[in-house]
Amino acid sequence: MTVHYPLFKKQDIDAFFALFQNNLANFVVITVTLLGMGFPSSIVFGRVIPGIAVAVIVGNLYYAYMAKRLSSKENRADVTALSYGISTPVMFVFLFGVTAPALALTNDYELAWKIAVAAAFLSGLVEALVSFFGNWVRRHLPRPALLGALAGVAFTFVIGEMLFETFAIPVIGLVTLAIILVGFVAKVALPFRIPTSLFAILAGTILAFALGYESWGTIGEALSNVGFYPMLPTLAPFEGMTYLFGALIGLLAILIPITLYNAIETMNNVDAMAAAGDSYDVRECQAVDGVGTMLGACFGGMFPTTVYIATVGAKEMNAGRGYSLLNAAVFALAAVTGMIAAFSALIPMQAIAPVLVFVGMSMIASTFANNEKKYYPAIVLAMVPYLANYMMTNLNTEAGEVSAGIVPLGEGAMFTAILLGAMTVCLIDKNFFRASMFALIAAFLSFTGFMHASSLAFNAAPDFTVGYVIVAAFLVYIGVKERQSELVLRESTDSGERMAS
């Protein structure tokens, strides 16, 4: 007997709100940040938002299809579709690590947008290619190092940046943060069973208007952004690629590792869903994320997408595929009509920021929870380069006055974080020869300018290159000595056993 897998059911409503709030928060942060950088509304609302919406629509529809296919294959009606949307940590990297440098170099908003769109397209292409050998990457790259680097992004650009926004207007930010902590940390049900994020955003927005931090004239301004913003294809990814492989080729030092993170995080989230009962093909999911990102870029979107860890929460709500379909429909309508622009004008950043503070907290907590305690030092060390990157990004030339090491540590921070973390993991495991290989990789990346240098060039960071080579030689020496000690100990033990017998 074939079971009926419904297109929509009651449980999809709660799951939809949970996913919608997450994506909405990202859309609002993107909008406010880009407008704050000076990007014109014609680019933000006319190109970026519709482009991102294309990626969100395509991904949600495909994952709903995958859920239907799994339901038919296993003859089950309790299959939950994968949650999908903009990757929050990657979004911050693209805002401050890709778009801001592109704008600083070109001083041209149109050109900076094209470069960011090209970067998103390239990121999607890399993730689609990674789907062919993602398992190999996962096996050979120490997980504490990769997640530690991501925790560094979460600590600086997610928690740090958003907590600063929260405290900018404390009467709104602190109240909203308290609601988030009560709902998500204390796990207390809020009035009328309203989802925590929605309650926090509503409370923060109402406070802003009631206390005069937002004027009632803002409503008219918000409504003035409502209009028709068609989803139009663009050649921007290919026009921007010229600059991405030219003056801004150093951005590849950010794109490649953050894309690898995105692919592996998709893998982890799909694995978590398999543990919850729904087993999807990891490689297909990575390919979907990559293709979705590329399609979004071809319509003006400049942010990669991913499978969310919130999928497990949707599974616990007994959601099906309807919440994904509803999410696709609502974001299509919101993007095309300009409602995203209206929401961005109405909702103060202090009402959204605490939601993302909790996201950052969860990312860091998850990093430690999903790794053995012995690897905590590697995680902490991997977090530090992005603190330097944050200081370098925000202090500009003044960062070098604080310490001469901030700028070189911050340049190529993702590579530095992963490799320092990987070496530390290997040392914890007493795998000195493997640690030396990571040191040699660091030497090569320093020599070519992917790390510790402002641009790609041969012999770009000679001091760091030599330093890493010496470290590699030292680790080989330690490895040889340790192996000799083990042999002596083993021979001594064998000799003792023979004498005893």
Image: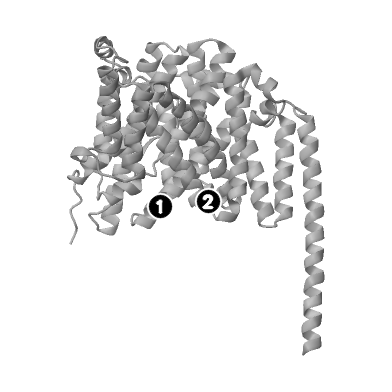
Relative vertical location of residue 80 with respect to residue 460 in this rendering, above or below: below
**Could you say which is closer to the camera, residue 223 or residue 277?**
223
- C-alpha distance separating marks 1 and 2: 15 Å
**Could you say which is closer to the camera, residue 354 or residue 18?**
354
What residue is shown at x 31% (from left), y 41% (from top)? Answer: 183
Q: Secondary structure at mark 1?
A: helix
Q: Is residue 187 visible?
A: yes
Quarter occupied by residue 168: top left
Name the residue at the bottom extreme: 501
Which residue is the site of mark 2?
Answer: 135
**Could you say which is closer to the camera, residue 350 or residue 320?**
350
Q: Secondary structure at mark 2?
A: helix
Whether residue 33 sits left or right of residue 392 in the image: it is: left
What residue is shown at x 26% (from left), y 54% (from top)? Answer: 72
x, y percentage for residue 306? 42, 38
What residue is shown at x 26% (from left), y 9% (from top)? Answer: 217
Going by the numbered disc 2, the residue's amino acid type is Asn
**Could you say which is closer to the camera, residue 392 or residue 276?**
392
Relative vertical location of residue 65 with respect to residue 258 in this rendering, above or below: below
Which residue is the site of mark 1?
Answer: 272
Mark linked to residue 213: none
* Label 1 crowd bin: few (<14), some (14–19), many (20+), radius 10 Å: some
